[in-house]
Image: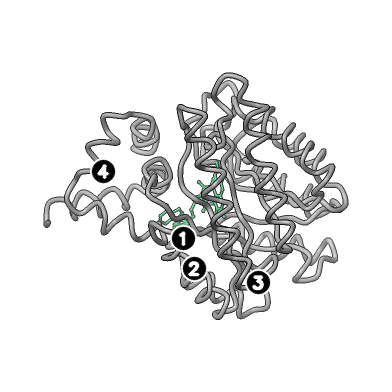
Amino acid sequence: MLGPVILAASRSDKMRRFVSAAPGTKQVVARFIAGETVEQVVPVVKEAVARGLEVTLDVVGEDITTREQAAAARDAYLELIEHLAGLGLGTKAEMSVKLSMFGQSLEGGHELALANVRPVVEAAAAIGTTVTLDAEDHTTLDSMFAIHEELRKDFPQTGCVIQAYLFRTEGDARRLSEAGSRVRIVKGAYKEPASVAYQDKAEIDKAYVRILKILMEGDGYPMIGSHDPRLIAITQELARGAGRKLDDYEFQMLYGIRSDEHVRLAAEGHRMRVYTAYGTDWYGYFMRRLAEKPANLLFFLRSMITK
Ligand code: FDA
């Protein structure tokens, strides 16, 4: 019940100000956000790779309101790529981007987001790595998929995310499971109406498994974004059934969540990529993490009281 309330608060400026200024916030945020600057995140990347993990880096931010902010988002990713260039990690360090941060919701936003994300994808390809387009709320997805298709003409390795809670996603999964495509499947983290999305957790899990089957039996490269132990076991079973080798798919989890599991799966020979978010505009990202697990909210409230 708390999840939808927290997700509604994630869009409130008043709550943003309150949460950002609350005592104890920084300490709780640090569990999910790997640092504020690119200089702080680079050692985190190196350490993850040294432990047998891979990463996808997210410069936090979304819902920007000016073209200047969209350009700044592009530049932040370009700065990140400059830092990664010296590490020579190839696809062990890729990037995840939210098109809303690149101007998608502004006037002429579709073209603007494409124009801002293209140089990032180009720069990533130049250092031998890739970009994955995150999935945001359902109203943004037609534009996201069209941008994905456009980018893939020149950069076929560009990935995208699909969300199991949406009714449309089985169709998207079929369309996307062609040779050379990279698709991350997640449950979905936004507040969506019953007209477009399953509301019941069990229904979402069942849809996730149906989509997993489509991806595993297809010709693309599935990226399994989940911390759910049942879904991880089902993935392994389906991958075996589809004759996929361990490097024909990968698991992905969020920085700060089930970290032991990251290492355990990597030690079993799986590719495990940690979605590593950093930056100062962490509010929306942080609130979605609270909404996923109400116990996080209790921990957060307790940290405010004990400060
Ligand atoms: P579920 O929520 O059932 O959690 C399973 C278990 O994992 C929990 O019991 C708990 O132990 C642990 N857990 C999960 N979330 C936790 C949290 N916040 N804090 C502490 N423990 C937690 N969504 C989206 O809409 N668009 C996107 O682009 C992405 N991208 C993305 C990338 C990657 C790599 C991941 C892992 C997830 C996303 N998501 C996302 C978020 C996704 O939609 C979903 O909200 C979360 O992954 C939580 O769902 P689980 O599959 O982990 O299952």
Q: Are marks 4 and 2 in contact (CB under 8 Å)?
A: no
Q: Is mark 1 within 8 Å of ligand 1?
A: no
Separation (CA) of disc 4 from disc 2: 25 Å
Which residue type does callout 2 highlight? Val
Question: Residue at coordinates 84% horizontally, 51% vertically from top-left?
Answer: 218
Task: State the separation of the CA atoms marked 1 and 4.
Answer: 21 Å
Pick the residue in front: 266 or 85: 85
**Which disc, if any, is residue 38?**
1
SS class of the residue under badge 4? helix
- Mark 4, residue position: 20
Comes first in the chain, label 4 or label 3: 4
Q: Residue under label 2, please give it.
A: 42
Q: Residue at x 60, y 39 (%)?
A: 135
Q: Amino acid at mark 4?
A: Ser
Q: Please name the residue that numbered disc 3 is placed on.
A: 89
Left or right of 65, for residue 71: right
Alpha carbons under labels 1 and 3: distance apart: 16 Å
| First in residue order: circle 4 vs circle 2 | 4
Crowding at mark 1 (Cα within 10 Å: few <14, some 14-19, many 20+): some
Disc 4 to disc 3: CB gap under 8 Å: no
The chosen color scheme is one colour
Disc assigned to residue 201: none
Disc 1 marks a residue whose amino acid type is Val
SS at circle 3: loop
Question: Residue 71 is drawn in which quadrant?
Answer: top right
Q: Check disc 4: other Cα within 10 Å, few if <14, some if 14-19, many if 20+.
A: some
Earlier in the chain: of badge 1 and badge 3, it is 1
- The residue that appears at 38% across and 38% down in the rendered structure is 3
Mark 3 Cα shell of 10 Å, populated few (<14), some (14-19), many (≥20): some
